[in-house]
Amino acid sequence: MADEEPLSADFTTLDDLKHDMSELSIAFDNSQQPLSSAHDRAVTGAGDFKNELQSGAAGFLLAWEVAFRTMSDGAALVGNNIGKTVVDLKATDVAYSSTVQL
């Protein structure tokens, strides 16, 4: 291991990766509306069975909303820290939803 070359990266490639992760994060964010619309159509389309379907469909929708939000945050976290040797905490909290009082 001592005689291995140090790791290096092409900055263009790193920028491309950052862009791809940002686009993935945005795509996950944008999935909320189509998912919600599909939920509404499914419940409406159930006709007489709407009441039986509604609570399960709401739970299903919530689970996917949480999953997409988590994947969006994860993609943003990875994208904001590609090519760095330290973690940028401001970039990590993309929504600026967390603060630390010092």
Image: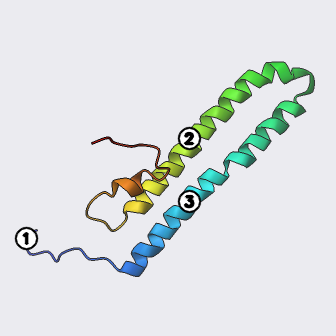
Tag 3 and tag 2, C-beta contact below 8 Å: no
Question: For the residues marked 3 and 1, what is the alpha-carbon distance in whole angstroms?
Answer: 37 Å
Give how far across and how far down residue 49 sits, in percent: 87, 21
Q: Relative to residue 29, is residue 14 drawn left or right?
A: left
Q: Position of residue 71 (x, y in %)?
A: 52, 48
- For label 2, the residue is 67
Element assignment for label 2:
helix
Which residue is located at x 61 percent, y 51 percent?
A: 29
Q: Is residue 21 above or below residue 61?
A: below
Image mark for residue 90: none
Q: Which mark is residue 2?
A: 1
Q: Position of residue 57 (x, y in %)?
A: 73, 29
- Closer to the camera, 26 or 89? 89
Residue type at mark 2: give it: Ala
Could you tell me residue 98's position as x and y percent? 42, 43
Mark closer to the observer (1, 2):
2
Number of residues whose C-alpha sits closer than 10 Å to that of mark 3, classed few (under 14), some (14–19) or many (20 or more): some
Looking at the image, is mark 3 or mark 2 earlier in the sequence? 3
| Discs 3, 1 touching: Cβ within 8 Å | no
Amino acid type at circle 3 is Leu
Quadrant where the image shows the N terminus: bottom left
Q: Is residue 29 left or right of residue 11?
A: right
- Give the amino acid type for the residue marked by disc 1 in the picture: Ala
Q: Nearer the viewer, residue 35 or 3?
A: 35
Q: Residue furthest top?
A: 52
**Which element carries disc 1, helix, strand or loop?**
loop
Of pointers 1 and 2, the one earlier in the residue sequence: 1
Q: Which residue is mark 3?
A: 24
